[in-house]
Image: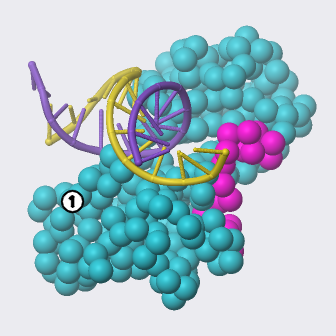
Chain colours: A cyan, B purple, C yellow
Amino acid sequence: MPELPDVAGFKKYLDAAALHQRIESSQCFDERFVKEVSRRSLQRRLKGAELMGSDRWGKWLFVRTDTPPTLVLHFGMTGLLDYGSDDGDPPEHTRLLVHFDNGRRLAIISRRMIGMASLTDDPRRWADDHDLGPDALDVGADEFVERLSGRRGSLKSALMNQSILAGIGNVYSDEICFQARLHPAIGVKALDERAFANLHRTMRRVLGVAAKRGGDATKAPRSWLLGKRGREANCPRCGGSLEAATVSGRTAWFCPACQPKA
DNA sequence: CTAGATGTTAAGGT
DNA sequence: CACCTTAACATCTA
């Protein structure tokens, strides 16, 4: 479930752990995981490169090197990073293993095969080619309204649309709707200027707070919906029962009392 | 054993 | 054409 806040956590982890390490070699254990370039060319082009830092864009992580290809990572639904001593077997479901010249290694792990690694010389162009909208934590109020208004679909599906805004998935779209007190299935058309302003403010706050915690749901404030999705839980605001609805093919959790449809 | 979960994308629909 | 929705993908858990 890595969404923007989780990937922010991966960035922090990677920058703290592996910055300025030089790549001795890399191994790809599953050819399906590397996209757009061959495994061999990925390995060849990473060899000898030094990690110069990383940039997050939506749910994507761009790992810059000095040589200069940038490693592009997506964590799908089950991806994570593990940096550690390079002895013994890598963690289970490691798809890409990067060996550094200091005796440590970075494992890019993904249980299910949704997620990928790629290479680019131009991250900005890469994002453009892949139709990525502006990062949801970066986007200003005016651009936010500009990109959302006129859409025909539901609020939740617009928030999750990566070409409108990059970074929001199922869980955080529910959280943003909950805290903005908007029903996830209302049409974007129904929102007026005030509703957009409130929504933008709420989105920035939710993602900002969550990103600071690196997406750790166990550390989310108790007033949040996060982690309460499911049968047993009640609304943290009014105590009423939560409801689930299918909105554009995903399960939305919400409080029918706090998030009226009209 | 089957259903459901997650994010992206291709395919189908308006 | 622009936009929206659905189904498929892989694989593990309930």
Classify residue A251 as left or right of residue A75.
Answer: left
Which quadrant, please, contains the C terminus of chain A? bottom left
Residue at image coords 33%, 46%: A249
Front residue of A252/A44: it is A252
Furthest-bottom residue in view?
A194
Residue C8 lies, in percent from the top left, at: 37, 23
Chain letter for mark 1: A
Mark 1 Cα within 10 Å, few/some/many (few <14, many 20+)?
some
Residue type, numbered disc 1: Ala
Q: Main secondary structure of the magenta part?
A: loop
Q: Quadrant of residue A20?
A: top right
| x and y, in percent, of residue A75 in the image | 53, 39
Q: Is residue A214 at least partly visible in the picture?
A: no
Q: Give the residue displayed 43% in from the left and 76% down from the top.
A: A190
Residue at numbered disc 1:
A244
Q: Quadrant of residue C10?
A: top left
Q: Which residues are magenta?
A: A123-140
